[in-house]
Image (spheres, helix red, strand yellow):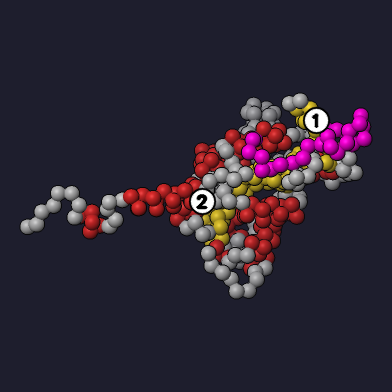
Amino acid sequence: MSQHIAPLSKKDFASDQTVRWCPGCGDYAILNAIKNTMPQLGRNKEDFVFISGIGCAARFPYYMNTYGFHSIHGRAPAIAAGTKLSNPDLSVWLVSGDGDSLAIGGNHFIHLLRRNLDINVLLFNNEIYGLTKGQYSPTSRLGQITKSTPLGTLDRPFSVGELALGAQASFFARTIDTNPKLMTKLFVESSKHKGTSLIEILQNCVIFNDKAFEHITDRAHQADTQLHLEQGQAMLFGQEKNKGIRLNGFKLEVVTLGENGITEADILVHDAHEVDTTLHNMLIRMQPPFPVALGIIRAVEHPIYEEMVEHQYEESLAKAKVHNMDELLASGNIWEV
């Protein structure tokens, strides 16, 4: 890892390329949050590499003044894994969309998560194919009218978080493109996590799926529709912080402090470090009339793949009877002419 002499700023990470997304696209806010994040990580520009697949989000590497790789559809996880294995000192960031990661790239995506390389994954989820002009994606909602489903999609959508936990992801967080402060916070925290960190970013596509998350982002009601999780803190929300999440048997329920004898002691306390995934899955599944869970939902320790590969390699060298080409050529049955 290289060391920089002078502190870096947001401007240091801006490339000379004109940023081209549709006016009002949530990608602009995500890019801005990443540029705010990079100087906080205390590393040089040459220590970062951004790798993308295909889609609107895949333009990201062009807009970062770091190393970058605009790869092919669905294969960004494989290329990111190879990059990290070949140079573990790099800080590798994978940028992808819901179609790129969960459709053609689904197989690479789940295996990246289960192997747990130290890679940061930003998954832009706008619940639509934007670059190819509005076809339904793996996260589009049941019955959604799109260019390719004029009568409504019949597919049940993937839940990014549930899929991740099913693939044994060690870190899963969720944020929204309208909250740059939360995005920056989660980007910083994901960089600290040792292992594959996945952040689902609910991102608005103003052209083909506008206001898909309005029920969450509407400022008039967002205090009641968003649950901001904090480690070790009670799951409270609402304008007065007087609503909370309680476990009632095997189900979650929304309760109000002061009603029916409910106190803060009845409210669940968030523990992202719990190894058991049961409660984390329940939080991921919450949809209206429940608030949507935002923040770090899961962050547990698992062995890191590239470290295990290096350890395995060193062990094999220690046990090897042949260490170089000369020894190989002189091994076995030989004779002199």
**Viewer-proximal residue, 136 or 186?**
186
Residue that appears at 80% across and 30% down:
253
As drawn, 203 above or below 65: above
Q: Give SS at disc 1.
A: strand
Hey, what amino acid is under mark 2? Answer: Ala
Q: Is residue 204 visible?
A: no
Location of residue 14 by image quarter: bottom right
Location of residue 160 by image quarter: top right
Task: Give the total number of marks visible in the rendering.
Answer: 2
- Give the side of residue 216 with respect to residue 259, left or right: left
Residue that appears at 23% across and 56% down:
327
Query: Residue at label 2?
Result: 80
The segment highlighted magenta reads: 254-277
* CA neighbours of label 1 inside 10 A, class few (<14), some (14 to 19), many (20+): some
- Give the side of residue 337 with respect to residue 37, left or right: left
Question: CA gap, disc 1 to disc 2?
Answer: 40 Å
Is residue 259 shown in magenta? yes
Judged by depth in the image, the label closer to the viewer, 1 or 2, is 1
* CA neighbours of label 2 inside 10 A, class few (<14), some (14 to 19), many (20+): many
Looking at the image, tell me whether mark 1 or mark 2 is earlier in sequence order: 2
Q: Main secondary structure of the magenta part?
A: loop
Give coordinates of residue 184: x percent, y percent. 70, 55
- Give the side of residue 124 with respect to residue 312, left or right: right
**Viewer-proximal residue, 33 or 42?**
42
Give coordinates of residue 6: x percent, y percent. 63, 74
Residue that appears at 49% across and 56% down:
88
Is residue 210 shown in magenta? no
Quadrant that contains the C terminus: bottom left
Hey, what amino acid is under mark 1? Answer: Glu
Q: Is residue 253 visible?
A: yes
Query: Residue at label 1?
Result: 253
Residue that appears at 83% across and 41% down:
236
